[in-house]
Amino acid sequence: MKRFAFLSVILLASVPTIALAAGAVEGGSKQAINWSAIGMFVGFVGLTLVITYWAAKRTASAADFYSAGGGITGFQNGLAIAGDYMSAASFLGISGLVYTSGYDGLIYSVGWLVGWPIVTFLIAEQLRNLGKFTFADVTSFRLGQTEIRILAACGSLVTVAFYLIAQMVGAGKLIQLLFGLDYWIAVVLVGGLMMIYVTFGGMKATTWVQIIKAVLLLSGATFMAGAVLYKFGFSPEALFTKATEVHPKKLAIMEPGTLISNPLSAISLGLALMFGTAGLPHILMRFFTVKDAQAARKSVFYATGFIGYFYILTFIIGFGAITLVSTDAMFLDGSILEKTKSGIAAIKGGSNMAAIHLANAVGGNLFLGFISAVAFATILAVVSGLALAGASSISHDLYGMVIKGGNANEQDEIRVSKIATLVLGVLAIFLGIVFENQNVAFMVGLAFAIAASCNFPVLVMSIFWKGLTTRGAVVGGFLGLVSAVVGVVLSPAVWEVTLGFAKGSAPIKLDNPALFSMAIAFAGIWLVSILDRSKRAAVDRYGYEAQYVRSQTGIGAASATAH
Amino acid sequence: MELVRQPVQAATAPREKGLPPWQKFQRIIQGIIDVSNLEKIERDPNYQELVRRRSSLGWLLSAVMLVVYFGFILLVAYAPKFLGIPLGGGVTTIGIPIGLTVIVLAFVLTGIYVRQANSSYDVLIRKIVEENRS
């Protein structure tokens, strides 16, 4: 049965080659077919399917499925976390942002990174000591299971949904450009492969897909940045000098530009990026794949190193693209160049393609193929991690703990999880197609805002504040969730750009609502908790001591492996 | 089918009025931690040292990261021209090393914490676990 399924996925993987012939005839805005890219991508998919087959044979228990049996080492998990976090949006988006605005790209990179130390200092070890499969295990440790699990599932699923839609739409657009495939084929392909990885291989396969992708992405980016610096005699000053000469904004690319105009908006975005990282369910879930708190802590250290290094590379790549891509007619759209006289604006496929064109400029067609395949692999890996987190929340938190009251049969729970993955996959494909022509840029920001305003406050208060009660967590958590969603809808990005109301009419001027939605969440949690005189509240406060001892020492923590 | 069952932990709480709080508590979290050891662990000087050292370092480093990052954001928001001051007559501005320093600092602070934890917290934890093995 399994073998049959495996064969059929290989068949599925060869669909792009067939569909490609059709796609190429239609032409349009798509790139020419890139055979080396296709070849390397098929190679990557083949390798990951072999891994999935291997992992499927070793995935029997719930612990295998949710947390790879706790058998991932700190270093491997560090790579996998970096893999989860270095999405195509950050690779192509940040290098594209550097390409158009220079220094502004660095501001974003810094924001994406600074959440990691906080995760290390305050969350990683405690999470591993208290939890088993999902972060709701931690928040519901001493609080009312039913209410807290429902809250956590809402927070997780909404975060995952928005993040997933953004990734799917981005994936469709990108693959259309890179491989010359139709948008819907690209979305179906990504969704289909994601369902295979997660349902057959669970966390084990997902982790190894992340690790391979992280290694490929880091090596590709290193080569690119190295090649750029080599062209300038390893002198950043020479690179910057040339970039300021050819960029229409001249010296302005070396300082903060128009990206951050409103100080409150900047602080709000900073809060969302910093604390959202510590509330993303697919990231938090990774801490349960290692054997103990020590490994959890080491894995964030490695991850912080890899991610920081990667962002420095994207900065160099962005500047490299300014000097090598915007000056080469091969990568520019002639008619736009005619109109704007700016190589930056005329880049084929938009600024997100800066890194891809640079790959061609420094490494020729073969390396272009490699980077394109890596970008696709990146999307696949990230959506798989998201789908697994969403499915775990449904099967472990909602089915296992709420519906079955903690007495679910392990095999039933795994089955629910696989069904949930399929449902999420189909839903993601559907929404990906629905949102094809929508501006989805705000969705990642929204995912971070919800993670920072719902998941993070409840998690951090449950670990560190004795006074937290079930009622306080539920009220504050939902307040944070609702205010984050409302805040995004009323922000300029959605109110004016997506919904089309007049410019300047947005009721809330902040691009990201974290500043007030986090404040509302924390205030709600605090106020409702201190006013809570229920019997349940007494139990909640009473359980804190034992929880604290376990979070500090790991005594009684879920054992690593079920083998 | 019974759709929503009372969760394990909450089930025991309100009905057992007669029991002393300690026993009530024991029932609530049975199976999660060996409760008879809880008081003993809390009195253990190794445990007290672990908690004191870990939380002071953890919160201190978090505060450093927060101050540095939001200091950087405030510079971006209120003093973008300061970040645009060229270094030594070239085109590289002071903002570049500042931005890169925040990135490197994030890694270094994480490293400091992990080093401390590996060298001293783990030793303390091992002692606590050994002493309190029932």
Image: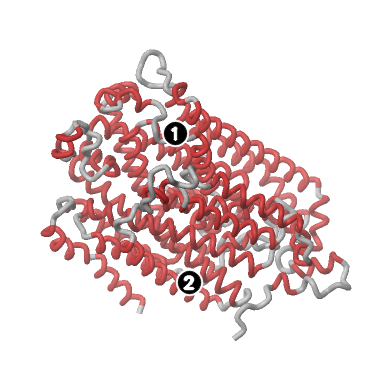
Residue A351 visible in the current orientation = yes
Q: Quadrant of residue A307?
A: top left
Looking at the rendering, in which quadrant would you find the C terminus of chain A?
A: bottom right
The structure residue drawn at horizontal position 19% and vertical position 55%, both measured from the top left corner, is: A180
User: In screen coordinates, is A461 left or right of A51?
Assistant: right
Give me the residue at 71% from left, 70% from top: B9
The mark total stands at 2
Residue B22 lies in what quarter of the image?
A: bottom right
Label 1 sits on what residue type? Ser
Q: Name the residue under label 1.
A: A261
What amino acid does circle 2 point to? Answer: Ser
Distance from the alpha carbon under mark 2 to that under mark 1 = 45 Å
Crowding around mark 2 (Cα neighbors within 10 Å: few <14, some 14 to 19, many 20+) is many
To which chain does the residue with label 1 belong?
A
> In the rendering, at what x and y percent does residue A217 appear?
35, 46
Q: Is residue B71 left or right of residue A544?
A: left
Residue at the farthest top position: B89
Q: Earlier in the sequence, mark 2 or mark 1?
A: 1
The residue singled out by tag 2 in the image is A417
